[in-house]
Amino acid sequence: MSGKSLEGRKALVTGGARGIGAAIAQALARSGAAVMIGDILDDAGKATAAEIAKAGVKTGFAKLDVTDDAQWERAAAATVETLGGFDILINNAGIEITSLVADIKAEDARRMCDVNIVGTVLGMKHAFRAMRPGGAAGKGGAVVNIASVAATIAFPSIAVYSGTKSAVDRMTRVGAMEAGKLGYGVRVNCIYPGLIPTDMGLQLANDIVKIGLAPDVNAAVGSVVEQTPLGKLAEVSDIADAAVFLCSNDARFITGIGLPVDGGMGM
């Protein structure tokens, strides 16, 4: 998207140090928003914030393990203090640990649930508290949760990840209903990205090869492209532009949806 559709808005992006999160943070900044980067990666997160600041955008970094309630409280407060408000949350932080169902380790399943499910709902919790009337920011806003096309298709080797991203979709809809009915003035939506050649996406391709589902990485990626009507992988800018749209006034009457940005893979 172009222009300054988010002029005056204040955003917190989790997992914003790199990959999809960094792309979304940069797109929000280009659209006029001030942006706080929340991540466990101190150096990378500060570097992303510094890059955004070069354009004269108000920005900052908050150390944030999304599984930690107290860290969420501090990150929300830091966003309000540093940026002068808080009316956009991008719940992007997530992890994927590849495994066949027959080989899943309990600790890996719990870790994905903790980051992808608990981390997302804690984000909504603290965004709602800050953005609703009487909150630290108190002017309403928009929450965008990053789910996955994995929530809509049966792709082998990512059963638990798929389950967690399906949970993100369900929590998005309940959160949207609560925020609307309780008069918070907060819209809540989610995005289903397709496979993207970020570190996480390429790791999945390599893992698929290791467990014997594809002969090599090119074949693993090719199988995804074959399942995608538009015939290519997604790019981080595709997801970033969708996030900007959902946060903007152009989406003012949209809440409780899951927006596929997957080239048709999940239709």
Image (spheres, rainbow, N blue to C red):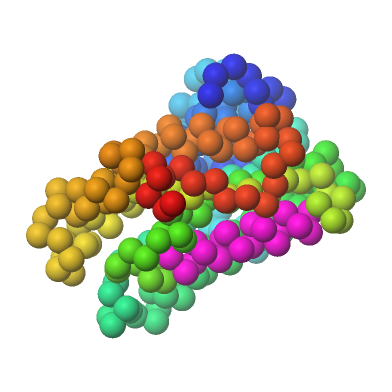
Predominant SS along the magenta part: helix
- Image quadrant assignment for residue 158: bottom left
Q: Is residue 90 left or right of residue 183?
A: left
Image coordinates for residue 62, horizontal then vertical, percent: 58, 45
Residue 218, horizontal then vertical, whole percent? 14, 48
Classify residue 210 as left or right of residue 237: left
Residue at (15, 52) in percent of width and height: 219
Residue at (67%, 52%) from the top-left corner?
A: 256
User: Residue shown at 21%/62% (left/top)?
Assistant: 208
Q: Would residue 222 be found to the left or right of residue 85 on screen?
A: left
Q: Residue furthest left?
A: 215
Snapshot quadrant of residue 178: bottom right
Count the numbered circles shown.
0
258 to 20, vertically: above or below: below
Residue 168 painted magenta: yes
Query: Magenta segment range?
Result: 162-179
Residue 132 in the magenta stretch? The answer is no
Above or below for 263 versus 177: above
* Relative depth, front residue between 139 and 63: 139
